[in-house]
Amino acid sequence: LRIAVFASGSGSNFQAIVNAVTAGRLDVRIELLVCDKPQAQVVTRAEAAGVPVYTFKPKEYPSREAYEQDILEQLQAKRVELVVLAGYMRIITDVLVQAYWGRMINIHPSLLPSFPGIHAVRQALEHGVKITGVTVHLVDGGLDSGPILAQRAINIERNDTEASLSDKIHPIEHQLYPEVIQSIADGSIDLTWNQWNHHESQI
Ligand code: GRF
C-alpha cells in the first residue's frame, strides 16, 4: 500500500509509522510527507528517514482549494492509495475529500464524537469525564468527523493534568495508528464497507 502522511508539527505519530515500517510491523511504502510548515520538526524526521517531503506555505495561495490542488497532483504523481493525517492542523476541503473519500484517515486524542477540535485533551478534563481515549476515523469534510474505524480508551485519574494526560495518550496513538494502517493494508479493516455504510446513512 502506498501512503502519504500529512503533519504540521512534531511528528511523533509520523515517527511511529516510520518505526513500524522499519521494524517490519507495517507493510506500506511511505511515498510522501506533506507539511504546511516548512520549519516543523516532522520535516527533519522525514529527511532522516529518507521519506520525500512536500512542503507548502498556505499564505502563498489564494485559497485552501488552490494548495490542495497542488497537493493532489503530488499524491497522484506518486499513486498514493491512502492519505494518513497525523497532526495535520488544517481543515480538508472538497478537493481532497472527493479525491480520497474512503481513503483518508485521521487520528484524534479523544473518544469521538466527544471533543473534536484542537483542545480535545483539555476539554475532556474540563468536563470531568472519567474515560477518554484515541480515535482513528475516515475523513469527511467536517472537523474530526467521519466514520470511526478504531478507538482505545484511557482512564482519567483524579490528579491528571493536560500534560500528564497527553503523556498517556501519545504512546497509545503511536501503537494504535500503525496497527490500524496495517489492518487497512492487509484488508482486515474494509474501508469499502465503511464508505458504503456512510453513504447509505446519509440518504
Ligand atoms: C496527536 O495528538 C494527534 O492525535 C493530533 O495531533 C497530535 C499530533 O502529534 N491530531 P504529533 O505531531 O504526531 O506528535
Image (cartoon, rainbow, N blue to C red):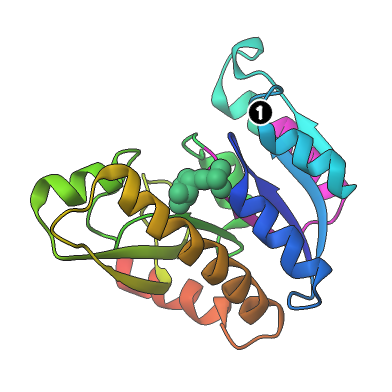
Residue 16 visible within the image: yes
- Quadrant of the image containing the N terminus: bottom right
Q: Which residues are magenta?
A: 69-88
Q: 67 or 114, which lies in front?
A: 114
Residue 113 belongs to magenta span: no
Neighbours of disc 1 within 10 Å: few (<14), some (14-19), many (20+) = some
Picture coordinates of residue 117, whole percent (x, y): 32, 41
Residue sitting at x 40%, y 64%: 135
Picture coordinates of residue 183, whole percent (x, y): 62, 81
Residue 83 belongs to magenta span: yes
Q: Secondary structure at mark 1?
A: loop
Residue sitting at x 85%, y 39%: 47
Residue sitting at x 41%, y 77%: 197
Picture coordinates of residue 44, whole percent (x, y): 77, 34
- Depicted 148 relative to depicted 65: above or below: below
Q: Residue furthest bottom?
A: 188
- Residue type, mark 1 in image: Ala
Q: Is mark 1 within 8 Å of ligand 1?
A: no
- Depicted 129 relative to depicted 198: above or below: above
- Depicted 38 relative to depicted 8: above or below: above
Residue sitting at x 69%, y 38%: 42
Residue matched to label 1 = 40
- Depicted 78 relative to depicted 89: above or below: below
Picture coordinates of residue 202, whole percent (x, y): 31, 65
